[in-house]
Image: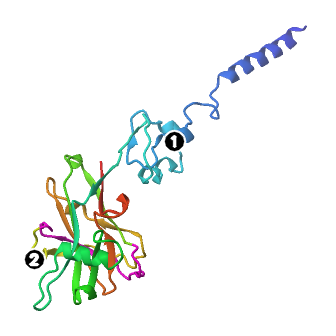
């Protein structure tokens, strides 16, 4: 082999060896955009920690900071993010019933009478229902409101409350058709339905609007302001009619447990 040919072959071998040592952006571990996007916990409000990908892996389109970090899907656990886990606390009402308001020389229809009249007339024995009706023919056209009291549970002590939802389920009694109203929600003064002699006064203004038409055995949801909950104190609410097309809801004597009045609180 000539000296010139040996030199050419040696040069090619050196070039190949050096080429193997050069960075290849297709395989460089710094390019981890796809991995980075999976580290951001979908649905959490967490933010990447200091061990998140560096600028070498930043997507120039800005897709690393997409909306996935603020969606409401259930968060997962990942060491590359700081997750905020949301929990829910379900509170059952310790009192739930209706009152027929005084009209003219007619006094208050007490909760026990309101419940019996509403339930017996609808084929449900003497328990189970409460009424929301602007003109209730069962009580000589008196307005009828439903009242709910929810205790403060220890599970909320020290928690940051981020959302409050009231859930009621309409009854399925014979002869009832779809109502054109759900009623609106008001905060009201403290009450005890077992000894009440006057209707509890409403406070300020409605805190949740009427939700429209309600069918039979339909769960109705109202979003309430978190300020309605006062730490350590029970929450007193009124369901106030906006129409004379009355709607009946199940109270604590509902035939199914998941039909009872419920306050669902979301906390950090």
| Picture residue at 10% right of the left edge, 91% below the top | 105
Q: Which residue is mark 1?
A: 38
Q: Is residue 126 magenta?
A: no
| Picture residue at 68% right of the left edge, 20% below the top | 18
Residue 193: x %, y % from top left? 15, 68
What secondary structure predominates along the stretch shown in magenta?
loop
**How far apart are labels 1 and 2 at the CA level?**
59 Å
Q: Which residues are magenta?
A: 172-194
Q: Quadrant of residue 192?
A: bottom left
| Picture residue at 35% right of the left edge, 58% below the top | 257
> Is residue 68 shown above or below 123?
above
Disc 1 vs disc 2: which is toward the camera? 2
Kindly identify which numbered label has been placed on residue 116. none
| Picture residue at 13% right of the left edge, 67% below the top | 194
Q: Which residue is mark 2?
A: 198
Q: Is residue 116 visible?
A: yes
């Amino acid at each position: 082999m000539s000296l010139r040919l040996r030199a050419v072959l040696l040069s090619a071998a050196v070039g190949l060896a050096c080429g193997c040592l050069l960075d290849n952006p297709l395989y460089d571990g710094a390019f981890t955009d796809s991995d980075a996007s999976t580290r951001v916990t979908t649905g959490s409000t967490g933010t990447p920690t200091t061990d998140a990908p560096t600028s070498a892996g930043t997507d120039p389109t800005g897709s690393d900071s997409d909306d996935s970090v603020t969606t409401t899907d259930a968060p997962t656990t990942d060491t590359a993010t700081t997750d905020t886990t949301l929990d829910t606390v379900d509170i059952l009402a310790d009192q739930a019933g209706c009152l027929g308001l005084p009209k003219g020389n007619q006094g208050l229809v007490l909760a026990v009478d309101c419940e019996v009249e509403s339930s017996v007339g609808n084929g449900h024995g003497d328990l189970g229902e409460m009424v929301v009706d602007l003109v209730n023919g069962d009580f000589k056209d008196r307005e009828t409101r439903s009242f709910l009291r929810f205790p403060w549970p220890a599970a909320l002590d020290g928690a940051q409350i981020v959302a409050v939802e009231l859930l009621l389920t309409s009854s399925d009694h014979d002869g009832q058709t779809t109502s054109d109203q759900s009623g609106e929600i008001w905060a009201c003064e403290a009450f005890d339905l077992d000894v009440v002699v006057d209707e509890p006064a409403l406070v300020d203004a409605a805190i949740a609007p009427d939700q429209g038409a309600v069918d039979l055995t339909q769960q109705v949801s109202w979003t309430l302001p978190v300020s309605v909950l006062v730490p350590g104190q029970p929450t007193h609410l009124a369901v106030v009619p906006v129409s004379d097309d009355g709607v009946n809801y199940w109270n604590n004597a509902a035939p199914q447990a998941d039909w009872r009045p419920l306050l669902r609180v979301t906390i950090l």
